[in-house]
Image (cartoon, rainbow, N blue to C red):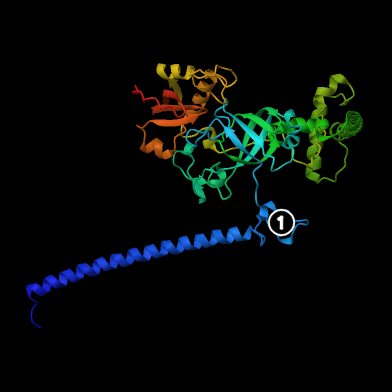
């Protein structure tokens, strides 16, 4: 075979390059087709969902209430596949996820309102009758700002600083059903609206249910009072006195019987058992030794002889239900009480403090021409400062920001104030507190 000429070699090189480009183009086309196929499947799924929720007359099925529940609806309920309807939406002093407390106890001055929708009840205020007797309520809500519906079996809680644990051992919002639970303080009820504090929910959060907080049922430490006080169990005062009388009488009889048995068994040592010869001789030697030291008969009736006689306490009653209280204890993960991320010291610059004092409290009335900014939820600049300290002391930054963006400013919104701060070693410093949407020229940060 004759060797290739220089011209032929150049042609082969060009052809090889073109083939390589064609292969890349084919690969890109395949990826585009795969993306189009996935988008097509999602589109079909959305169409099927829309069709399944609409009947043949064009009405939305969720707005149509049949006269009798269908079998499919009953089956879905038994299987736990239900369609939730929010009873209301939170109006909160936190408008964005950034800076919102991860737990309700972090920021005590945080406030919110929840109005029960009339689409759920014709008279929403009737559903709240009696709830004013409670100081705290459980709020069951949806994490509607997750950004995506994916979830993983292991997550990285910010307090663990990057370590992975199971999602069900945390309160991560990224869960299979995206359900949230918070304990909020109930300040007051006005008509169909609940005024809450100690919250960790952002504005617009869909609320699914409200339940009263009852320490005797919800707190293991408080269950001792319920066990020792029958009134909490629904027993009347007369029934309680009668029950206590019978219990005292039975206890006295049992104690007397147990005391007599103890005297017979311990003081007189009756031969109730057939013992081996070795054990019987040993007991006799012990008895003779005791009688040698104390020749007087061991009579337990004399008060002076009570310390010399061994008294066996009656056995504790067997309880069929769990025993709560001092003997019971609750345990939590070590990283909850001693997290790797320590609390921060929060400080304000003089400029930020002056800006914060310019805000008008929510409950005060000011002239309409007043140019000062106004809080919508917070009641004083001092309360706002306490809320800011609560948010920043718990280090609201994500693990990524904590490790990769240490030198960058941190922004969050509290009520009607935009807060600018930065983090140092063991502290956070507030630099600016300006009204939300302020068009003023940004002042240089010191």
Residue at point 54%, 33% (across, down): 337
Residues 402 and 58: in front is 58
Residue 141, by quadrant, is top right
Residue at point 69%, 32% (across, down): 221
Residue 34 in the image: x percent, y percent?
Answer: 41, 64
**Horizontally, is 110 left or right of 316 in the view?**
left
Residue 327 seen by the camera? no
Residue at point 75%, 56% (across, down): 66
Compared to residue 365, the image places residue 41 above or below, namely below
Residue 358 in the image: x percent, y percent?
Answer: 48, 17
Q: Which residue of the protein is positioned furthest toward the bottom in this rendering?
A: 1
Residue at point 69%, 28% (across, down): 190
Picture quarter with the N terminus: bottom left
Residue 238, by quadrant, is top right
Picture quarter with the C terminus: top left
- Check disc 1: other Cα within 10 Å, few if <14, some if 14-19, many if 20+: few
Residues 119 and 377: in front is 119
Residue, disc 1? 78
Secondary structure of the residue carrying numbered label 1? helix
Residue 244 seen by the camera? yes
Q: How many marks?
A: 1
Residues 149 and 285: in front is 149
Residue 150 in the image: x percent, y percent?
Answer: 50, 51
Compared to residue 116, the image places residue 245 above or below, namely above
**Horizontally, is 178 left or right of 394 in the view?**
right
Residue 366, by quadrant, is top right
């Amino acid at each position: 075979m004759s060797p290739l000429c220089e011209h032929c070699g150049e042609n082969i090189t060009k052809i090889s390059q073109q083939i390589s480009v064609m292969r890349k183009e084919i690969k890109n086309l395949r990826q585009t087709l795969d993306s189009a196929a996935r988008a097509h499947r999602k589109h079909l799924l959305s169409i099927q969902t829309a069709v399944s929720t609409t009947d043949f007359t064009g009405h939305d099925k969720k707005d149509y209430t049949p006269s009798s529940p269908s079998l499919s609806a009953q089956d879905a309920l038994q299987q736990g596949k239900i369609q939730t309807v929010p009873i209301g939406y939170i109006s909160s002093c936190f408008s964005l996820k950034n800076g919102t407390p991860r737990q309700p106890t972090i920021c005590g001055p945080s406030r919110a309102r929840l109005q029960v929708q009339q689409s759920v009840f014709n008279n929403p205020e009737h559903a709240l009758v009696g709830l004013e007797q409670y100081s705290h309520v459980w709020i069951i809500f949806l994490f509607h700002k997750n950004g995506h519906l994916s979830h993983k079996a292991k997550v990285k809680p910010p307090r663990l600083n990057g370590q992975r644990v199971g999602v069900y051992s945390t309160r991560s919002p990224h869960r299979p059903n995206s359900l949230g639970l918070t304990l909020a303080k109930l300040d007051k009820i006005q008509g169909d609206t609940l005024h809450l504090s100690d919250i960790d929910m952002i504005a617009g959060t869909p609320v699914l249910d409200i339940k009263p907080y009852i320490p005797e049922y919800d707190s293991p430490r408080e269950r001792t009072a319920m066990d020792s006080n029958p009134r909490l169990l629904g027993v009347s005062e007369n029934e309680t006195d009668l029950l206590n009388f019978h219990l005292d009488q039975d206890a006295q009889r049992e104690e007397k019987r147990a005391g007599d048995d103890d005297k017979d068994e311990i003081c007189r040592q009756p031969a109730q058992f057939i013992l081996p010869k070795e054990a019987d001789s040993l007991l006799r030697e012990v008895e003779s030794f005791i009688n040698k030291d104390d020749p007087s008969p061991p009579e337990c009736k004399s008060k002076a002889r009570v310390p010399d006689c061994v008294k066996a306490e009656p056995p504790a009653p067997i309880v069929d239900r769990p025993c709560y209280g001092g003997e019971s204890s609750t345990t939590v993960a070590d990283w909850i009480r001693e997290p790797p991320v320590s609390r921060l010291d929060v400080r304000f610059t003089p400029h930020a403090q002056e800006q914060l004092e310019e805000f008008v409290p929510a409950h005060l009335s000011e002239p309409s021409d007043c140019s000062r900014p106004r809080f919508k939820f917070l009641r004083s600049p001092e309360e706002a400062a306490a809320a800011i300290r609560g948010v920043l002391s718990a280090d609201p930054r994500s693990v990524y920001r904590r490790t990769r963006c240490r030198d960058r400013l941190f922004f969050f919104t509290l009520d009607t104030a935009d807060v600018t701060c930065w983090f140092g070693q063991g502290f956070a410093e507030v630099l600016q507190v300006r009204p939300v949407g302020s068009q003023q020229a940004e002042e240089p940060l010191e």
